[in-house]
Amino acid sequence: MADIAFIGLGNMGGPMATNLVRAGHKVHGFDLVPASCEAAKAAGVMLASTAKDAVKAASIVITMLPAGKHVLSVWGDIVPAAAKGTLFIDCSTIDVESARKAHALAKAAGLPSVDAPVSGGTGGARNATLTFMAGGDAAAFAAAKPVLEAMGKKIVHCGEGGAGQAAKICNNMILGISMIAVGEAFALAEKLGLSHQALFDVASTSSGQCWSLTSYCPVPGPVPASPANNDYKPGFAAALMLKDLRLSQEAAKAAGAATPLGAHAESLYEAFTKEGHGDVDFSGIIRHLRASTRT
Ligand code: NAD
């Protein structure tokens, strides 16, 4: 069992750190928000007074922070404080460029590193059923895998440094686009007098079949566990979908890739969040689609 530093004990990091404690690791935690620290302490995390202090005792460091600027600032602070051989893992969802810069910081200090963003949301974090998409060299990935297994059920090595973030934003771009496609189809079906169940029964067994329809149906009824049956409580908030779509468009721009539907999905989620629905589940975009008028 290892000494693990965990920086960023928020909605995702708190339960992930708890699962490491459950797996028998000694977890040294730090967050800027006292309430998050106290919740982690109650779950068995040993609190450090600074991120640097958390790292000093650790052979593995995990960060779970809001965005690339936070990761680079924290890694800039803690990488120099880490002992030789310490493995750095960033599980935040951040831009590919910052992920590569974070790897470079670790490499310059002679330390192994992995970017390992997650999907599965807060439920997956609590139940240790997250999917990790990892980028880094083979040795760093092999060292990270057993630790990630204490927090998730599927760990995929996607390639070199930054590949985990690339996989995450490509996947979520598919998700954002496909949810809009399914929402549009239901909105059109309503206007054509076709019942939700009839469209679902056909499309879920035909070529329109996809996860946004069959596992996360944006209208109440056909998939009882989907947020549509619970007044669109997240789930996965529209603001987080917008964040990931923005990351996909930044990456597409930097790489010179044409992603017209990704760009349109970003603008629709931006309009939805500007209307004040950022904390609504992302499948609630169907309400925005219904309210739009044809030009
Ligand atoms: P959150 O805001 O609840 O937690 C982030 C934590 O980082 C906060 O507690 C904050 O105080 C802390 N923090 C910020 N700067 C810090 C610093 N300098 N030092 C120490 N702590 C600092 O966010 P979250 O929902 O836990 O998400 C974390 C990451 O996971 C994000 O990148 C997000 O996009 C990603 N993610 C979230 C979900 C989800 O469903 N919430 C799903 C997949 C991925």
Image (cartoon, rainbow, N blue to C red):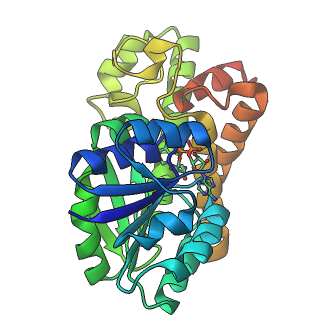
The spot of residue 34 in percent (x, y) is: 60, 41
Of residues 145 and 222, the one nearer the viewer is: 145
The spot of residue 225 in percent (x, y) is: 34, 19
Residue found at x 52% / y 28%: 283
- Asked if residue 207 is positioned above or below residue 145 in the image, the reply reads above
Residue 157 visible in the snapshot: yes
Instruction: Judge from the rendering whether residue 221 lies leftward or rightward of residue 69; answer left or right.
Output: left
Quadrant (top left/top right/bottom left/bottom right) for the N terminus? bottom left
Of residues 206 and 215, the one nearer the viewer is: 215
Residue found at x 58% / y 13%: 191
The spot of residue 41 in percent (x, y) is: 43, 41
Residue found at x 67% / y 65%: 69
Q: In which image quadrant can residue 120 be found?
A: top left
Q: In which image quadrant can residue 128 be found?
A: top left
- Asked if residue 92 is positioned above or below residue 251 in the image, the reply reads above
Instruction: Judge from the rendering whether residue 234 lies leftward or rightward of residue 111; answer left or right.
Output: right
Of residues 153 and 254, the one nearer the viewer is: 153
Residue 166 visible in the snapshot: no
Residue found at x 63% / y 29%: 279
Of residues 80 and 184, the one nearer the viewer is: 80
- Asked if residue 85 is positioned above or below residue 119 in the image, the reply reads below
The spot of residue 15 in percent (x, y) is: 39, 41
Q: How many marks?
A: 0
Quadrant (top left/top right/bottom left/bottom right) for the C terminus? top right
